Image (cartoon, rainbow, N blue to C red):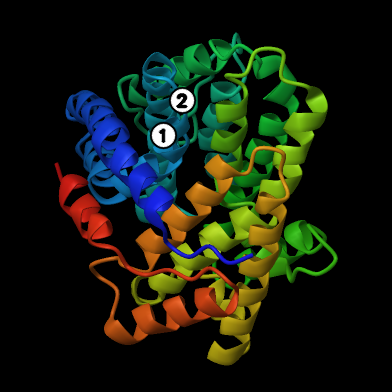
Amino acid sequence: MGTRVDNQTVALALRFLTAVVPKASSRLRAWRTRAGAIPDPSLRREALSSIRHKAFHVHGGCVFATFLPAAEAASFVKLVAAYETAVDYLDNLCDRIGAQDEADFRALHEALADAVTPGAPLRDYFRHRRVADGGYLAALVAESQASFAGLPSYGAVNALVADITRRYCELQALKHLAPGERERRCEAAFGNVAPDLTWFEGAAASGSTMATFALAHAAFTRGLPALHAQQIYDACFPYFTGLHILLDYFVDQDEDRAHGELNFVACYPDAGAAHAGIERIARIAQQRLTALPDPEPHVFALRAMCGYYCTRPTLSKSARQAALEILRHAGVDLDPHPLLKLYTRMARS
């Protein structure tokens, strides 16, 4: 089944841009103000940088709010803004001012395990560092806990969200280690995610928060059956989540190479193998999402995600064409739409 851009997709994109993105931007401005009060200058710099350069992660997670009534959409955006901001902040702390200390990475990422566990006591996440951030990360965790607790059917998805989070935290503890060790450890940890995935594809699948937000969206349904929650998990992980991170890494290859960071697309033997691998995963992701009982929010999320990554302003013309070609071969036929250009302007606000 192809996913050609049509009038319905355009209408949904307009709703997302006009009703969801402004709410997300407002929440990010509030967190930016809070980040600006962090006492330590290096931690403050990374908190502000994560919001400035990764706001599109929050907007992307909020895409499911397009399908919620206004009040629930506002609650969902609040959840995503707090949780994804914590995710991006921690990534910056490990990438930019980490010391390849696994114990430190694990302690920091305890924040995410606590964030998805309402009522869990907050811990000293900075115990392996000389300074903390004045309560900024703790505030993100506390707001995340309150938001997850407010979901009517969080009990039906909690264990699944915890599993996704555990996988994510394990990846973050390993992928920031020294070159050589990080590859060996990731291969051991993620080599069995699925029989048809390589270790680096399995690791990529473990690095996305989209399944968490898909489940949070579903948890607004009162009396959500456990079977439906499991169906969403199985549809999203590992192929939709894998596609998400592989596209992200595909467009960031030059930047990651410059910073010496582990890039899972660069783990393929060559460009042809990378294109074929991403195309295959995209095809399976689309098949699984369209088979859900309520596929529309998930298929729209896939379209929006692919459309965004294929129109990133920093993407070279050749890389853009390559990404579009991969997705077209997988049946995700995207016609870059002027609405995506509008989004890139709105996202800077």
- Residue at screen point 60% across, 74% down: 330
Res. 139 image quadrant: top left
Q: Which amino acid does label 1 sit on?
A: Thr
Number of other residues with Cα within 10 Å of mark 2, as a class: few under 14, some 14 to 19, many 20 or more: some
* Helix, strand or loop under label 2: loop
* Helix, strand or loop under label 1: helix
Viewer-nearest residue: 46 or 325:
325
Res. 180 image quadrant: bottom right
Which residue was labeled with disc 1? 66
Q: Is residue 38 left or right of residue 330?
A: left
- Residue at screen point 23% across, 67% down: 313
Viewer-nearest residue: 167 or 183:
167
Viewer-nearest residue: 93 or 40:
93
- Residue at screen point 53% across, 62% down: 3
Q: In this view, does 130 lie to the left or right of 35?
A: right
Which residue was labeled with disc 2? 68
The quadrant of the image that shows the N terminus is bottom right
Q: Is residue 22 left or right of residue 120?
A: left
Res. 319 image quadrant: bottom left
The quadrant of the image that shows the C terminus is top left
Q: Which amino acid does label 2 sit on?
A: Leu
Q: In this view, does 4 lie above or below 205?
A: below
Task: State whether residue 177 appears in this view.
Answer: no
Viewer-nearest residue: 123 or 201:
201
Task: State whether residue 13 appears in this view.
Answer: yes
